[in-house]
Amino acid sequence: MGEQYPAIEPHASGLLPVGDGHQVYWETVGDPAGMPALWLHGGPGSGSSTGIRRYFDPAAYRAVLLDQRGCGRSTPLADSAATDLSANTTQHLIADIEALREHLMIDRWVVAGTSWGVTLGLAYAQQHPQRVRAMVLAAVTAGRRRETEWITRDMRRIFPREWDSFVAAVPEAERDGDLAAAYARLLADPDPAVTELAAQQWCAWEDVHVSLAPGWKPMPRYRDPAFRQVFARLVTHYWSNGSFLDDAPIDRRMGRIAAIPAVLIHGRYDVSSPLETAWDLHRQWPASRLVVLDDSGHGGGGMSAAIVDALDGFRQAP
């Protein structure tokens, strides 16, 4: 399996105006004349991290990292109840990716990502297949309501005590409904005490439902109050709206990308996003290869090495 490459600094970066008052942060690392590649982070709302740069061979790739609308170093941040999220949808993010591709004068690129970034990458590729050379997708998701219902409700069967704490933050009358939507309403409350408690409880549950993998440790980023607000607000916004994919479900449009080479990487211990989704997509995708990691969950274990290995395999993608 591939070793991560040494730490590297960007050779270019900026804020790209994309409309609706938004600017998205982007950076490029590696060889300016290398194979173009795009990394899509998870969440929604996680933002990119410096560690992602180490996935790409700097002698072969011109890797592009961006922070999606409302998070990371993009502006404005979705960090308060007053945030207007009406112009933050999957279609807006796809349009931002295309705007960035054109801004950087890239014709086609390798698209990679993890978790929510997989859903976004698939939606982008299905809309713009002619722009995608290959794909590397880890911790596979497809943005289906059944997936978010599993995380927010059905996983009580695995973590009953923690789920009871998670649902206790929701008004009793709303506990049998869409829990992501209930949390989204709490995070839109004008009282900062309400939004802070909601963000804490949401992020505590996020830490729990990915915790089955060996060697799991709590995520330090959830200790940051500003990160909690952005992350919880964006995740609940997207999940309560079916990831804005109800009219274009990813699993019903796989024929559009059937010929795009891809590596799907998934952890055996990923109980929050069960292997079923990766398997179902792989079966509909003749040009894909599925790698199942027996030591990983929704990350961790050998996942980083598997991502590097897959990206190394596409350094000369046609």
Image (cartoon, rainbow, N blue to C red):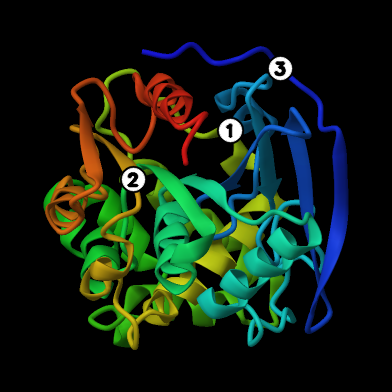
- On the image, the x and y values in percent for residue 99 come to 72, 69
Where, by quadrant of the figure, is residue 177 drawn?
Answer: bottom left
Cα separation between marks 1 and 3: 20 Å
Q: Which residue is mark 2?
A: 261
The residue where tag 1 is placed is 220
* Residue at x 27% of width, y 56% of height: 163
The amino acid pointed to by label 1 is: Pro
Q: Which mark is residue 143?
A: none
Say whether disc 2 or disc 3 marks the residue closer to the N-terminus: 3
Whether residue 114 sits left or right of residue 80 in the image: it is left
The mark that comes first in sequence, 2 or 1, is 1
Residue 145's place in the image compared with 206, above or below, is below
Q: Position of residue 146 (x, y in %)?
A: 21, 70
Quarter placement of the N terminus: top left
Where residue 88 sits: x, y (%)? 62, 78
- Residue that appears at 59% across and 50% down: 46
Asked if one can make out residue 93 in the rendered structure from this viewpoint, the answer is yes
Dot 2 crowding, Cα within 10 Å, few <14, some 14–19, many 20+: many
